[in-house]
Amino acid sequence: MKHSKLKPGFYLREDVLEITNELIGKFLVTNIGGTITSGMIIEAEAYNGITDKASHAYNGRRTKRNEVMYGEGGVVYVYLCYGIHHLFNVVTNKKDVPHAILIRGVIPTDGVSKILKRREQNTITKKTSNGPGTLSTALGITTTHSGVSLSGDLIWIEDRGIAFKKKEIITSPRIGIDYAGKDAFLPYRYRLDENIISDLYRSGI
């Protein structure tokens, strides 16, 4: 199977929803401490910049933490949630347009033994990396990686030739953003159909 790192132009496009949809089936790869680990992306959420009340950049908000969102697309944005979970985001669009995509779940593929060690588990289950916090732990991602280029050799995303039909990717409102008012109901969450996810865990990718 051919592995092709996504080119910078993939992230520089204007439509954050289109990019989010296309990330389903791609592979998030890390090379932490010389060990390659990866997982196929099965769930992601789009955050539409300054007009999106759920976004860290809503209404043009800029802080030391979220400044990386205002850079050119194709970099990593990692922030700490509840003081515990390191949440991995992909920054998209051109400079000063703070779009981002939260990766919410992956199915482990490469470096399984290392993933299990990081997660303190004996076998791969849906709980290994089926959440934004657990996937970061599984792949060794922390807030220290915020600002890292996805074109480098530390963290990147690959196309391995897997594509899903439109009906196989389910859209729904995002999770845990009740504070966002009407924007909380926008269908910006993309998740691979649950039956397909179960089949992939059972048969492998």
Image: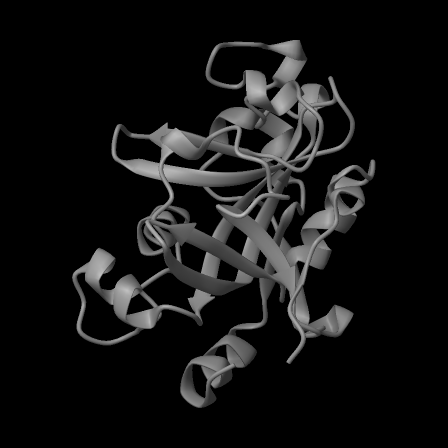
Q: How is the structure coloured here?
A: one colour
Q: Please tell me which residue is depicted at 65% across the width and 45% down the height of the picture.
A: 188
Depth check, front residue: 178 or 104: 104
The answer to whether residue 115 is above or below residue 88 is below
Depth check, front residue: 20 or 166: 20
Q: Is residue 54 left or right of residue 115?
A: right
Q: Quadrant of residue 83?
A: top left
Outermost residue, bottom side: 203
Depth check, front residue: 105 or 153: 153
**Could you tell me residue 185's position as x and y percent?**
62, 40
The answer to whether residue 198 is above or below residue 116 is below
Outermost residue, front side: 34
Q: Please tell me which residue is depicted at 78% across the width and 37% down the height of the picture.
A: 12
Quadrant position of the N terminus in the picture = bottom right
Q: Is residue 154 left or right of residue 50?
A: left
**Could you tell me residue 43's position as x and y percent?**
54, 57
Depth check, front residue: 75 or 172: 75
Q: Quadrant of residue 119?
A: bottom left
The answer to whether residue 132 is above or below residue 99 is below
Q: Is residue 48 left or right of residue 69?
A: right
How many labels were placed on the picture? 0
Q: Please tell me which residue is depicted at 36% across the width and 68% down the height of the picture.
A: 111
**Could you tell me residue 38's position as x and y percent?**
45, 62
**Could you tell me residue 29's position as x and y percent?**
50, 57
